[in-house]
Image (cartoon, rainbow, N blue to C red):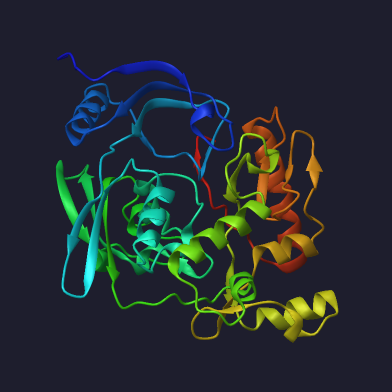
Amino acid sequence: MAPTALDIQQNVPLAPFTTLRIGGPARFFARVTTESELVEAIAFARERKLPLFVLGGGSNLLVSDAGFDGLVIHIAIDGPIDITVEQDSILYTVPAGVEWNAVVLSSAKQELSGIECLAGIPGSVGGTPVQNVGAYGQEVADTIEEVRAFDLHSGHFVDIPRADCGFGYRRSIFNTTSRGRYIVTAVCFRFNFLKKVQLTYADLKHYFEKKQPAPIEVYRAVREIRRSKGMLIDGDDPDSRSAGSFFKNPTVPRGTLDRIASELNIEPESIPRYPAGEDMVKLPAAWLLERAGFVKGYVLGNVGISSRHTLALINRGEASAADVFALRDTIRAKVKSIFGIELEQEPVQLGG
């Protein structure tokens, strides 16, 4: 086999690369900083018939205690944002390894609206289209123009327009129909100069009351709100040792509200919900957890629920992936037994 100039390490612990600080080692590990290094890493894996896993910021990842018996490619493709100004909009083309919050801050400072509500979300740019990252009434699909990626099927780099990305709630082709096919190396965002901030989330509406804030004001407010909920990464804050919201908000038929109301002996109108298409509603997973007895500060051994955010499962210091699995399964079983709803895990799971 031909030698590679790329530094391939062996038996690298993955826990330090995740915000949960949990997980076993990668058999092989490569930090790639250019597209050419990415091609080298892929060739290394294919020559040895190794499975691949692409690691970004590790903020939406739960690694098993056994780790990964293959090659983990850590995407660290960095560099300046390439800016193209058009008549009524501006394009930001951003390398996949750039810190996501830095992009949000940059656009907010330029008074560009579109991603200011996504401030403080940990991780790197490359992971945002995969999960169609969203929060506080915005999602990246609203501003993504196209995604540059390496196509493992064709062996070439491709530019995928937004219309072909299959964006939905926390979904895209990158984590559904084409899971494992593409490795994102850059994302292009389009911001319209005339777009104004639109507040749809209750916390932000309350924060600004009737004021029309600038994007940078929303950026700061969102970070303040996230900090109050333990959702900003902070080494001194035990509540931040999490993977963010662990469960997706389930979408259910509207008729489910009547059944839940009957089970809990409450009025259907008292159940919080959001429209989700014809005869469908989205229920807050946090409300389901709390009604099932899993409240803020809940503890199960070395893991628990954040004291400030119901959906954040946290590592209380010495937790293993098995500990997280146990809490996850306990929550899902109880919610299903009470509401008949199967909660879907949001973080990507590497290993069983």
Q: Is residue 243 above or below residue 86?
A: above
Residue depicted at 69% across the width and 80% down the height: 257
Residue 134 in view of the camera: no
Nearer the observer, 7 or 171: 7
Q: Is residue 34 above or below residue 112?
A: above
Name the image quarter holding the C terminus.
Answer: top right
Q: Is residue 221 above or below residue 321?
A: below
User: In this rendering, would 13 be left or right of 247?
Assistant: left
Residue depicted at 45% across the width and 19% down the height: 12
User: In this rendering, would 298 be left or right of 178?
Assistant: right
Q: Is residue 32 above or below residue 166?
A: above
Nearer the observer, 274 or 113: 113
Q: Position of residue 294 (x, y in %)?
A: 78, 55
User: In this rendering, would 114 be left or right of 352?
Assistant: left
Q: Residue furthest right?
A: 265
Q: Position of residue 309 (x, y in %)?
A: 69, 54
Residue 236 in view of the camera: yes
Name the image quarter holding the N terminus.
Answer: top left
Q: Quadrant of residue 173?
A: bottom left
Residue depicted at 38% across the width and 68% down the height: 114
Q: Quadrant of residue 64?
A: top right
Nearer the observer, 233 or 20: 233
Q: Position of residue 300 (x, y in %)?
A: 79, 40
Residue depicted at 25% across the width and 27% down the height: 41
Number of callouts in the render?
0
Q: Position of residue 321 (x, y in %)?
A: 62, 33
